[in-house]
């Protein structure tokens, strides 16, 4: 299928009728960026043609050099209109892409995607020339996924630039792209990328089917797309991996996964994924396996701290004081004597204050946001302790849990853990460590019930073999000869 002009084959005609300048004027009425120019082809008044385009989407220089100049200066019309079209399609106009459309709906879609339509009134057809403007953000360094030894480029908002970045990493014709158009009004282009001969064909077909069945008015964010692709859309835990780095995206494709790029969004989605994938970073492959394993253990320890520390502290302080060392318990009692609130309320209040400071730091401009988040935390925490509103140990617990969340590679996973941490805190305040244990059992039950396109979300921990070691540690590259069996890849061998 020719995807040079994105057109969804199952989209019903929105603008029925024949192609004409009057119909184009009626459709783009009250659109100040819509431009239409009537010229005489070959400077012959007997051969008028109409050019239609949207200002800003079409490059003015390309329009003048590759279309207007050949049509008016160097082109001499032949006797018939059919021969005129044939010569244009044969290369009389130097635009690199040209396509003939006989319906108004196809012509309108082409114009809204950066094409200039040359309307032939005699045949009620349009020749659409691709003259897209190159304006857009240039490739820059990643802002969220920092790179030490890896590449320094990141995805941008233009889908064709993003596919080119992936092509540079995987320079093989086995890298396949399936383009489609989502959103009845937005007409957003998406590209499904996979390695033929490596990725599971059933996985590729299922993803393409779900994208084809997705009915949206406009696709302007990743939320509706992730919900449509997720097996358990009501779960707070992420079921699609986001990355802004082309090298990480290409690594997952080479492993046998399938990637998804969306025009207008500078991130890529990777499917299927497991919980363990959200705990890995690209830098792990650029370091010694012992260093990577140590950092991996640190991240998993931070996950436990962020999830359990507030709830366990509240449960022990309210119900199980005998589990606290004597000196620490005496220090906690002395600091708690002048505090009017219970342990659960002060920890919950500080967690909410921490989240509000974090949200304020994200919403404010860069330098101001950093200042507010750091100075605000110091001032609020110190003032709360001096005013005997909260105890110092509560500040330490909340700060340790917050710092542990920041060490996690995925922000979506961090947000889900914060929600579950609040639930464990409430469970610990109501039933002590029994409530925390029940909350952890419910969490494991929930995670075990999530599937990602037939792959268990808790794999490799839930699979036979050394699952815990595979999840926590990274083996040397010499031992990684086969791809993950859970991905059901066609070619499992990485190296001989």
Image (spheres, rainbow, N blue to C red):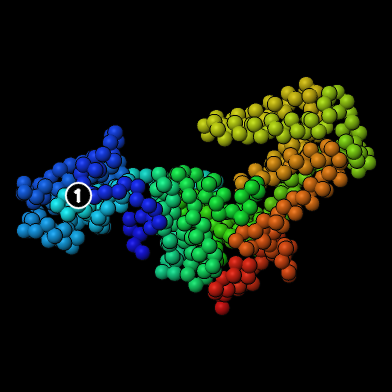
Which quadrant of the figure contains the C terminus?
bottom right
Q: Nearer the viewer, residue 469 or 147?
A: 469
Does residue 355 appear to the left or right of 220 in the view shown?
Answer: right
Characterize the local packing of mark 1: few (<14), some (14-19) or many (20 or more) Cα atoms within 10 angstroms.
Answer: many
Give the residue at mark 1. Answer: 119
> Would residue 249 appear left or right of 86 to someone viewing this image?
right
Q: Is 355 above or below relative to 129?
A: above
Q: Residue furthest front?
A: 17
Task: Kindly state the secondary structure of the residue where label 1 is placed.
Answer: strand
Assign the N terminus to one quadrant of the image: bottom left
Q: In the displayed image of the protein, which residue is found farthest to the bottom?
A: 496
Q: In this picture, is 450 found above or below 464?
A: above
- Residue 113: tell me if it is visible: no
* Residue 198 visible in the displayed image: yes
Residue shown at the point (46%, 59%) measured from the top left: 192
Q: Position of residue 354 (x, y in %)?
A: 68, 33
Residue drawn at point x = 12 percent, y = 57 percent: 81
Instruction: Please give the name of the residue rendered at 33% of the width and 58% of the height, measured from the top-left corner.
Output: 4
Image x and y of residue 350, in percent: 73, 31
Which is more toward the observer, 331 or 116? 116
Total marks drawn?
1
Name which residue lies at 60% across and 67% down: 487
- Looking at the rendering, which quadrant does residue 425 occupy? top right
Question: Against 465, is 435 above or below?
Answer: above
- Res 123 quadrant in image: bottom left
The x and y percentages for residue 77 are 8, 56
Q: Residue furthest top?
A: 387
């Amino acid at each position: 299928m020719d995807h040079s002009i994105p057109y969804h084959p199952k989209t019903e005609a929105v603008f029925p009728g024949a192609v004409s300048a009057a119909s184009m004027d009626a459709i783009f009425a009250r659109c100040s960026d819509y431009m239409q120019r009537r010229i005489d082809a070959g400077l012959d008044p007997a051969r008028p043609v109409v050019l239609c385009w949207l200002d800003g989407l079409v490059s003015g220089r390309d329009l003048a050099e590759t279309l207007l100049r050949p049509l008016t200066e160097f082109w001499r019309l032949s006797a018939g209109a059919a021969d005129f079209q044939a010569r244009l399609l044969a290369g009389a106009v130097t635009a690199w892409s040209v396509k003939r459309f006989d319906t108004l709906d196809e012509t309108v879609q082409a114009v809204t995607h950066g094409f200039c339509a040359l309307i032939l009134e005699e045949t009620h057809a349009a020749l659409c020339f691709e003259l897209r403007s190159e304006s857009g953000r240039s490739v820059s360094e990643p802002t969220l996924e920092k790179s030490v030894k890896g590449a320094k480029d990141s995805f941008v908002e233009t889908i064709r630039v993003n596919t080119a970045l992936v092509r540079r990493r995987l320079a093989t014709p086995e890298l396949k792209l399936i383009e489609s158009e989502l959103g009845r009004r937005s007409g957003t282009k998406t590209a499904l990328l996979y390695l033929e001969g490596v990725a599971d064909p059933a996985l590729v077909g299922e993803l393409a089917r779900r994208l084809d069945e997705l009915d949206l008015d406009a696709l302007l964010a990743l939320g509706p797309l992730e919900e449509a692709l997720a097996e358990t859309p009501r779960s707070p835990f992420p079921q699609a991996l986001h990355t802004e780095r082309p090298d990480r995206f290409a690594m997952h494709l080479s492993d046998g996964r399938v990637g998804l790029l969306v025009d207008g969004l500078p991130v890529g989605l990777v499917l299927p994924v497991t919980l363990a994938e959200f705990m890995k970073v690209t830098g792990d492959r650029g370091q010694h396996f012992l260093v990577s394993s140590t950092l991996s253990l640190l991240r998993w320890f931070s996950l436990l701290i962020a999830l359990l520390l507030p709830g366990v502290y509240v449960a022990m302080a309210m119900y199980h004081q005998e589990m606290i060392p004597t000196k620490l318990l005496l220090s906690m009692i002395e600091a708690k004597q002048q505090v009017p609130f219970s342990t659960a309320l002060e920890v919950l209040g500080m967690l909410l204050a921490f989240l509000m400071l974090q949200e304020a730091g994200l919403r404010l401009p860069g330098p101001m946001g950093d200042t507010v988040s750091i100075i605000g935390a110091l001032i609020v925490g110190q003032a709360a302790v001096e005013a005997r509103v909260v105890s110092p140990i509560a500040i330490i617990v909340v700060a340790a849990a917050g710092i542990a969340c920041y060490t996690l590679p995925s922000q979506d996973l961090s947000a889900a853990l914060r929600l579950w941490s609040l639930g464990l805190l409430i469970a610990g305040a109501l039933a002590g460590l029994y409530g925390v244990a029940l909350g952890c059992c419910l969490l494991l039950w929930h995670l075990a019930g999530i599937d990602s396109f037939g792959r268990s979300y808790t794999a490799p921990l839930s699979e036979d073999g050394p699952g815990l070691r595979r999840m926590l540690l990274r083996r040397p590259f010499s031992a990684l000869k086969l791809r993950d069996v859970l991905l059901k890849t066609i070619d499992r061998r990485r190296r001989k």
